[in-house]
Amino acid sequence: MRVLAAMSGGVDSAVAAARAVEAGHEVVGVHLALSTAPGALRTGSRGCCSREDAADARRAADVLGIPFYIWDFADRFKDDVIDEFVAAYAAGQTPNPCLTCNEKIKFSALSERAIALGFDAVATGHYARLDNGELRRAVDHDKDQSYVLAVLTADQLSRAMFPVGDTPKDQIRAEAAAKELSVADKPDSHDICFIPTGDTRAFLGATIGVRPGKVVDADSGAELADHDGVHGFTIGQRKGLGIEAPATDGKPRYVTEIDPDSGTVTVGSSEHLQVWSITANRAIWTSGQTPAAPFEAMVQVRAHGGLAPATVEAIDDGTDGIEGPGIRIRLQAPLTGVARGQAAVVYLPDAVNGDLVVGSGRIVVTGSVPGDLVSSTGA
């Protein structure tokens, strides 16, 4: 096969490309230039869009003896990922830009260009596995990235390769060292690649600007503080609330609700964070087939969150007030810190072959009443 290897400049994508070469494929490496003004050096281990990263990817390609190119996707990345990220925070949501990047850049824009140029597949360094076209968790659960890949359609998965998903990360580094790849000991990138400082609140403040509002108590409705914009808060947040006095009961306060229209941020005890039901829109079923009936599954609502047992049901356009296909989730036990804008990813546990990713959707409504969506936040 002709394989386009997406090379970020990190160890995982370098080994993924190497394994594609060793498998006998005709491999070409490509680095995506996603920043309109890439820095010369990375800040610590943050980000993956610097000139240093592009140079690291080129050196790895030279060692592997494969052609290498840099493709400029900066404008597309800004429109589809950064602007959507900012708009979601301005709307009181908590988005995951890695999901959007996979959905719209790496496995949409990149894949489309690759197919147009005659490539059969795109290989990346993501920690996940494909088994007969089915997306499953990586062997290394600590590094598993199936959550951020659950937005891929069956057609996109049919053109994807995840060569490192069957190997623990420490072995990937050892393999890179054995192949004399200079990125073998390079630190992992983390946080948000287009915010290399790691200060999301400062980035959003500079982008969105000041939009004053009030922090209010969930029980009494009393105004506790002023703030400069709802973009500075996420559901479940405990620190940085700007509240001078502790709660009367001495318990910690958390952000329990965000109203972008009024600019109100509501805080309360952990009990106010309990969520028993979830409605998600933008449903994607990785098999390409929409489930015909409700089924029992496990649900994950954060990239590094645990699994929760639930009853899952596909819903049609207009159901529960959402547009397009969606997912209704009724949890068997409450979750906390569930934020609108995040993904709800549905898994079927499989101890032998690894958990199977069934589908995903973006959270738009959460319900605080067991088995019901009547008492909810968001719309």
Image: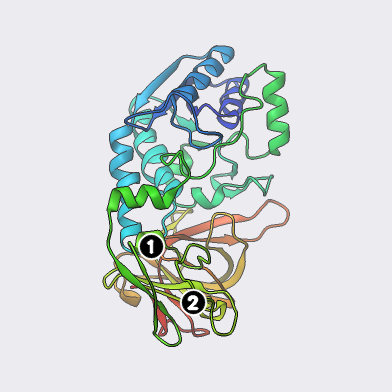
Depicted 69 relative to depicted 191: above or below? above
Q: Which residue is mark 1?
A: 93
- Going from N to C along the chain, the mark reached first, 2 or 1, is 1
Q: Kindly identify the residue that appears in the image at 50 percent across and 65 percent down.
A: 237
Q: CA distance from mark 2 to mark 1?
A: 17 Å
Residue 152: x percent and y percent? 44, 48
Q: Which residue is mark 2?
A: 277
Q: Kindly identify the residue that appears in the image at 48 percent across and 19 percent down.
A: 55
What's under tag 2, amino acid-wise? Ser
Residue 178: x percent and y percent? 72, 19
Q: Using the rendered view, name the quadrant where residue 108 is placed.
A: top left
Closer to the camera: disc 2 or disc 1?
1
Depicted 162 relative to depicted 292: above or below? above
Q: Residues within 10 Å of mark 2 (few under 14, many from 20)?
A: many
Q: Residues within 10 Å of mark 1 (few under 14, many from 20)?
A: many
Farthest bottom residue?
Answer: 220
